[in-house]
């Protein structure tokens, strides 16, 4: 019985000692000054919308790096707020790494379409339909849409299916851009999408003065397939140059006017 009591007491003392060591070690760790900030940004190109130096500078100010502030004083909520407030960051996380540094991981939005508003402002749209603002220092090469668009400035979670943007046709414009992007020939020849005063969609084909009238997104792939066949067949000919309009709205045909 005595041995059993002593054994239990030994386990209790050992456990208490471990707890004390853990608490002491954790306090020592939390009192350690933050050694630096590591920013890992995921994007498809070398340059992009997010300015790494700016994010790091703001994070350093939040962490009070100049005063060699302790790890315990790092305001992780403020760091996350900084990342969530960046309109060009799709997702992000932050944590304290094993080497006493603040590790920030972020993924940048990747656009497939740029849409110009009537007031000359513009937004970008991702493949998934997320809308985000343009950037003064970076303009990726994507298909452009312009014309009769009049939509408000996007918020953090704006999407082409939101009624205020769908009514302006941004969802349809994205469908057109994606369909063009999926065709290597058309993506190399169609430079812009234009929405005219009748809210019909037109395509601007490189080195072609004719108006290419798509009208709407009904039978979109069929319309684009007919356009591709015509362009490939008449590429570089005087006949193609003579056309004033190429109208794709009619089923199984292209109505051309000179």
Image (spheres, helix red, strand yellow):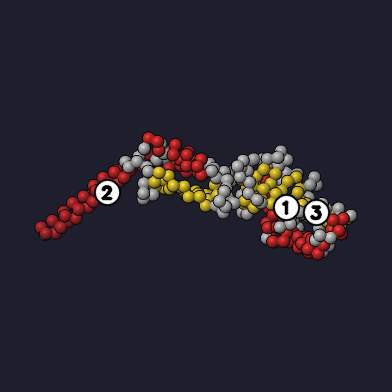
Position of 223 with respect to 143 (left or right) is right
Q: How packed is label 2: few (under 14 Cα within 10 Å), some, or many (20 or more)?
A: few
Residue furthest to the left in view is 2
Q: Nearer the viewer, residue 156 or 70?
A: 70
Residue 250 in the figure: left or right of residue 93: right
Q: Quickly name the residue at label 1.
A: 191
Q: Position of residue 215 (x, y in %)?
A: 79, 53
The residue singled out by tag 3 in the image is 208
Above or below, 74 against 110 in this view is: above
Q: Earlier in the sequence, mark 3 or mark 2?
A: 2
**How many numbered discs sit on the rendered protein?**
3
Query: For mark 2, what is the residue?
Result: 22
Comes first in the chain, label 3 or label 1: 1
Quote the CA–CA distance across marks 2 and 1: 63 Å
Which image quarter holds the N terminus?
bottom left
Q: Is residue 150 visible?
A: no
Instruction: Return the disc, 2 or 1, that comes first in the chain's sequence.
Output: 2
Label 3 crowding class (10 Å Cα cut-off): few <14, some 14-19, many 20+? some
Residue 135 on image: x %, y %? 61, 42
Disc number at residue 235?
none
Residue at 71% in and 48% down: 145
Q: Which quarter of the rendered picture does the C terminus lie within?
A: bottom right
Q: Does 16 sit left or right of 70 as displayed?
A: left
Tag 2 and tag 1, C-beta contact below 8 Å: no
């Amino acid at each position: 019985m005595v041995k059993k009591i002593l054994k239990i007491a030994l386990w209790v003392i050992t456990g208490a000692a471990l707890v004390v060591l853990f608490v002491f070690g954790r306090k020592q760790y939390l009192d350690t000054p933050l050694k630096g900030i590591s920013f890992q940004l995921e994007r498809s190109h070398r340059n992009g919308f997010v300015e790494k130096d700016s994010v790091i500078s703001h994070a350093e100010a939040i962490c009070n790096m100049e005063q060699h502030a302790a790890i315990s004083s790092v305001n992780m909520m403020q760091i996350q707020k900084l990342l969530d407030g960046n309109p060009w960051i799709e997702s992000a996380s932050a944590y304290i790494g094993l080497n006493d540094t603040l590790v920030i991981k972020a993924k940048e939005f990747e656009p497939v379409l740029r849409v110009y508003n009537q007031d000359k402002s513009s937004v970008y749209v991702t493949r998934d339909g997320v809308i985000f603002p343009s950037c003064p220092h970076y303009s990726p090469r994507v298909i452009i849409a312009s014309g009769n668009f009049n939509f408000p400035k996007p918020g953090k979670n704006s999407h082409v299916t939101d009624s205020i943007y769908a009514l302006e046709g941004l969802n349809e414009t994205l469908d057109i851009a994606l369909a063009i992007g999926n065709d290597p020939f058309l993506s190399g020849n169609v430079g812009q999408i234009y929405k005219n005063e009748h809210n019909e969609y037109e395509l601007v084909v490189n080195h072609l003065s004719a108006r290419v009238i798509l009208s709407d997104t009904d039978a979109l792939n069929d319309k684009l397939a007919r356009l591709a066949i015509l362009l490939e067949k008449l590429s570089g000919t005087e006949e193609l140059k003579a056309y004033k309009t190429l109208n794709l709205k009619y089923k199984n045909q292209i109505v051309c006017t000179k």
